[in-house]
Amino acid sequence: MKKRTKSVNIGEIVEGFCRSLSESGRTATTVSNRLGDLKGLIRWFESRHGIPFDLREFVQKDVEDYRNWLANRFRPSTISRRITTLNTFATWAVQQGLLNENEHPRASNVSVKRKPNLGLSIVGKAELSRLREEVRASGRFWEIAIFALLTETGLRVGDLIQLCWKDISFSGNEATVTIKKSALKSWSPSLPIISKVATQALVQLRSSGVKDESVPIFQKSGRPISRRFIEMMIQRYARKAGLDGVTPRVLRHTYINNLVASGASPFMVAMLAGFQRPEMTSSYYRPGAMNFHPSDLARFLEKETQGAKGDDQRVWSADRLK
């Protein structure tokens, strides 16, 4: 006899799934990402069929079409995460009696043909300045801080969304960001914040009150912001500045290219950009890696790079970069 399954409102299902993840020890960031992925899946289903989301209807008819839709819209890492979310959610649904075991989709990842690497995409000085002004004009201190951390420390989005106040040390009007990431293994770089605007924004955020030094700084509705939130924030300001194709990854490439153009050695670039080994910077030194004139970049970073003591110095103080 076929096992009967429960019928529950989809909002209650999603809430129960997220609660289960939290209780099993998943981080707030992971829970937030899973929630965002599920909401995206539900929106896709309802837009496609014009009816409220039906879990059984989806797993029986739409899994393959959903995978194909992902393959045509997102980068491989995002596709992989969303497929993982789908499988994790389906496993939980079977355990809760919402699906029968034989209805589990066990979706496989999508094989995506990568586009050829035609060089690193970066933003020119004038364009970056225009983008920066749009962000500053908003007056939103936390968004100003996010933008400054992306563009003036080269911080990865994954590190930024997990950044806590305990990772930031203040000294007078200066601040240093200490990134603690297991992938770096042997050491955690201290990244100087050379922007007065970024420092002021962080000071303003901190003055509004810090309940817990160990929780992520940037939150929305009580939850840590997601990668997608930051991507959409950058896209919003890029559109205001009349720019296309600007992403957090492009801003990181721009920061690293600026360091290279200013004459920084591979070891120094690896240290400031958070690479584990200097050889990981090789793509930034190859011919044609930069798409605007090196002298423009050199002038742009001239003030920030003067006074560095040497390549063997793993921690820079902010006053050395003024």
Image (spheres, rainbow, N blue to C red):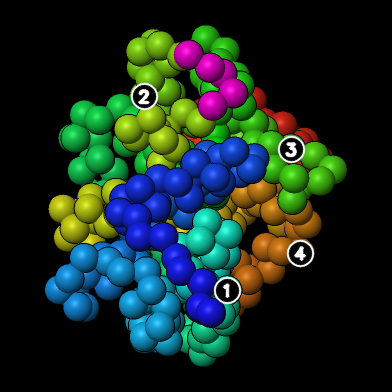
Q: What residue type is labelled 4?
A: Glu
Residue on which disc 3 sits: 188
Residue on which disc 1 sits: 101
Q: Do the residues labelled 2 and 3 touch (CB within 8 Å)?
A: no
From where the camera sits, is residue 164 visible? yes
From where the camera sits, is residue 234 visible? no
Q: Is mark 4 on a helix, strand or loop?
A: helix
Q: Which residue is drawn at 63% across and 71% down?
A: 283
Task: Using the rendered view, name the quadrant where residue 42 is placed.
Answer: bottom left
Q: Distance between the residues labelled 4 and 1?
A: 48 Å
Please determine whether, in this image, residue 175 is positioned above or below residue 89. above
Q: What residue type is labelled 3?
A: Ser
Residue in the foreground of this view, choosing between 139 and 12? 12
Residue on which disc 2 sits: 201
Residue 27, given in percent of the width and then of the height, sits at 58, 41
* Boundaries of the magenta span: 211-215
Residue 314, given in percent of the width and then of the height, sits at 76, 36
Q: Distance between the residues labelled 1 and 3?
A: 45 Å
Return the mark for residue 279.
Answer: 4
Q: Residues within 10 Å of mark 2 (few under 14, many from 20)?
A: many
Question: Quick check: 145 left or right of 163?
Answer: left
Question: Quick check: 302 left or right of 24?
Answer: left
